[in-house]
Amino acid sequence: QVHLEESAGGTVQAGNSLRLSCAASGTTFGSYGRGWFRQAPGKEREFVASIATSGGGTRYLDSVKGRFTISRDYALNTVYLQMNGLQPEDTAIYYCAASSPLVHLPHTPVQFDYWGQGTRVTVSS
């Protein structure tokens, strides 16, 4: 059974950093695209970042470019989201996801087949 599990989020002050991780189990996700989404209270889930398979590139939400970095460790079957310069508007529940190997740099929810349970990130001003 496929399972994605995010690390614990947390509460940080504006300007600080936080790194999320998402470990996959149940299958080898080396050929899958991986991504992060977030959902703030009262808002729809929005794409944050995705990473293709080796050498395939990354894609980011405009508002996080230059602040967030997505990366993956194939040996650990894990994807990371390094978040620097966090702002109150980054407060949300963050979800990791994995897409079909056929989708290049996925960025919409329907392109992802597997989801984690979500982890809460709160940024205080």
Image (cartoon, grey):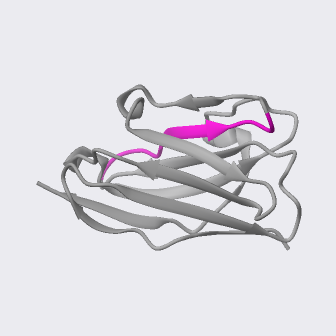
Give the residue at x 72% y 39%: 111
When the figure is inspected, residue 44 is found, relative to residue 91, above or below; the finding is: above
Give the residue at x 88% y 60%: 28
Camera-side residue of 41 and 57: 57
> Which residue ends up furthest to the left in the rendered image?
125
Give the residue at x 39% y 34%: 64
Q: How many marks?
A: 0
- Give residue 29's quadrant in the image: bottom right
Percent position of residue 97, x then y:
65, 53
Percent position of residue 78, x then y:
69, 60
The magenta-colored residue range is 42-54
Q: Is 117 colored magenta in this rendering?
A: no
Quadrant containing the C terminus in the rendered view: bottom left
Query: Is 2 positioned to the left or the right of 23 in the image?
Result: right
Query: Is 120 positioned to the left or the right of 12 in the image?
Result: right
When the figure is inspected, residue 4 is found, relative to residue 33, above or below; the finding is: below
- Give residue 52's quadrant in the image: top right
Percent position of residue 15, x then y:
21, 49
When the figure is inspected, residue 89 is found, relative to residue 3, above or below; the finding is: above
Percent position of residue 36, x then y:
56, 48
Camera-side residue of 54 and 29: 54
Give the residue at x 85% y 74%: 1
When the figure is inspected, residue 16 is found, relative to residue 31, above or below; the finding is: below
Q: Is 46 colored magenta in this rendering?
A: yes
